């Protein structure tokens, strides 16, 4: 039975890539009965008499998946944040990082529109902080093409999702990497300070020797499925120090002799990261239980 990878899902059809050929398929009725939805990124078995009339027969076990946007089997998430227009937000970045870390997906921080900075060092402090934590940070510009070669090196041979706030330049980045795509981009709304969604469906696009998902964006940024006791594991700089806390199960808020709070006091953990951790803890505590 032939195998392939779903690279696009649109209007009930699944487009399966098998080497260089794309087969248009529908899902078997058994998927609906089992409440299973094939996702972009799924490895599948299919049957087809021609390129337009195929059926997805089975789905291989997923190594990870996201719900919103619906995509599976990611190697990494490129978290795209603009230096300006809209302004760089560490709160939003840390929220994305927690969500990606909770799914065991490798995050890469990509800062766009660096050509708009008035001073070279405006973001240097934050860039240094995130690199010291261990994150890969790539500074780019779709106008000057700065950093695009470095970004392309990370995309090679990987299945990646581009994620970030609307208007940060995700589609512009992809257009710069692959000019023939001509993905639609919109200007930032002056009244709202953000861009309009320009991508309407999830699709894996060949780019820089890998597959890149251009998506409509994350429609939900809450911490559904993450418990208070698990949150610190989504902050690598906390996870590596948590065993040094005096009390097992320390959540690093009010407990005495907490290694995390000590690291914040000593400047080894950035204050803004710990502040966001406390903010996210409260959000999780206030989350209404689902029945």
Image (spheres, rainbow, N blue to C red):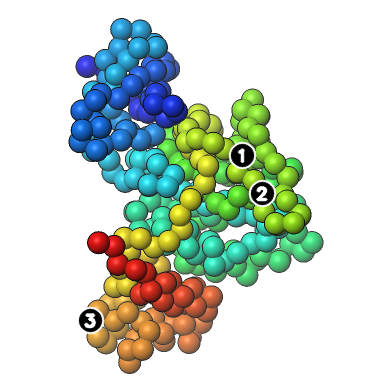
Which quadrant, please, contains the N terminus?
top left
Q: How crowded is the residue under tag 2: few (<14 C-alpha within 10 Å), some, or many (20+)?
A: some
Q: Which of the 4 image quarters holds residue 175?
A: top right
Q: N-terminal of the two: label 3 or label 1?
A: 1
Residue that carries the numbered disc 3 in the rendered image: 248
Query: With 46 as the anchor, is 41 left or right in this view?
Result: right
CB under 8 Å between callouts 3 and 1? no
List the single residue furthest toward the bottom: 256
Q: Which mark is residue 213?
A: none
Which quadrant, please, contains the C terminus?
bottom left
Helix, strand or loop for disc 2 = loop
Provide residue 33's location: percent of width, then percent of height: 20, 33
Can residue 246 be seen here? The reply is: yes
Provide residue 141's location: percent of width, then percent of height: 69, 47
- The residue lying toward the viewer, choosing from 128 and 30, is 30
- Residue at 43% x, 61% y: name it: 222
CB under 8 Å between callouts 1 and 2? yes
Q: CA distance from mark 3 to mark 1?
A: 47 Å
Give the vertical position of 248 relative to 4 (above or below). below
Provide residue 70's location: percent of width, then percent of height: 40, 42
Give the vertical position of 284 relative to 11 (above or below). below
Helix, strand or loop for disc 3 = loop
Q: How crowded is the residue under tag 3: few (<14 C-alpha within 10 Å), some, or many (20+)?
A: few
Can residue 7 be seen here? The reply is: no
Residue that carries the numbered disc 1 in the rendered image: 198
Provide residue 10's location: percent of width, then percent of height: 45, 28
- Residue at 32% x, 79% y: name it: 251
- The residue lying toward the viewer, choosing from 49 and 159, is 49
Q: How crowded is the residue under tag 1: few (<14 C-alpha within 10 Å), some, or many (20+)?
A: some
Q: N-terminal of the two: label 2 or label 3?
A: 2
Residue that carries the numbered disc 2 in the rendered image: 195
Q: CA distance from mark 1 to mark 2?
A: 9 Å
């Amino acid at each position: 039975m032939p195998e392939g990878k779903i690279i696009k899902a649109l209007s009930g059809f699944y487009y399966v890539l098998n080497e260089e050929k794309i087969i248009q398929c529908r899902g078997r009725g058994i998927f609906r009965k089992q409440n299973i939805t094939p996702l972009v990124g799924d490895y599948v078995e299919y049957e087809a008499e021609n390129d337009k009339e195929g059926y997805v027969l089975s789905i291989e076990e997923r190594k990870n998946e996201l719900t919103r946007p619906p995509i599976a089997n990611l190697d990494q998430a490129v978290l795209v944040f603009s230096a300006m227009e809209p302004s760089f937000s560490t709160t939003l970045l840390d929220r994305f990082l927690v969500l990606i870390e909770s799914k065991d997906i490798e995050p890469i921080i990509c800062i766009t529109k660096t050509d708009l900075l008035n001073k070279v060092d405006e973001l240097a402090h934050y860039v240094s902080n995130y690199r010291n934590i261990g994150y890969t940070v790539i500074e780019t510009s779709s106008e000057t093409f700065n950093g695009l070669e470095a970004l392309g090196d990370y995309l090679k041979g990987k299945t990646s999702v581009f994620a970030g706030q609307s208007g940060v330049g995700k589609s512009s980045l992809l257009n710069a990497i692959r000019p023939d795509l001509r993905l639609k981009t919109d200007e930032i709304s002056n009244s709202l300070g953000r861009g309009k969604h320009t991508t309407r469906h999830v699709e894996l696009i060949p780019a820089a020797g890998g597959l890149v998902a251009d998506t409509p964006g994350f429609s939900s940024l809450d911490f559904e499925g993450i418990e208070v006791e698990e949150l610190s594991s989504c902050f690598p700089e906390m996870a590596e120090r948590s065993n040094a806390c005096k009390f097992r199960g320390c959540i690093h808020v009010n407990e005495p002799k907490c290694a995390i709070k000590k690291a914040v006091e000593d400047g080894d953990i950035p204050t803004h990261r710990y502040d966001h951790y406390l903010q996210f803890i409260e959000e999780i505590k206030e989350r209404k239980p689902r029945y």
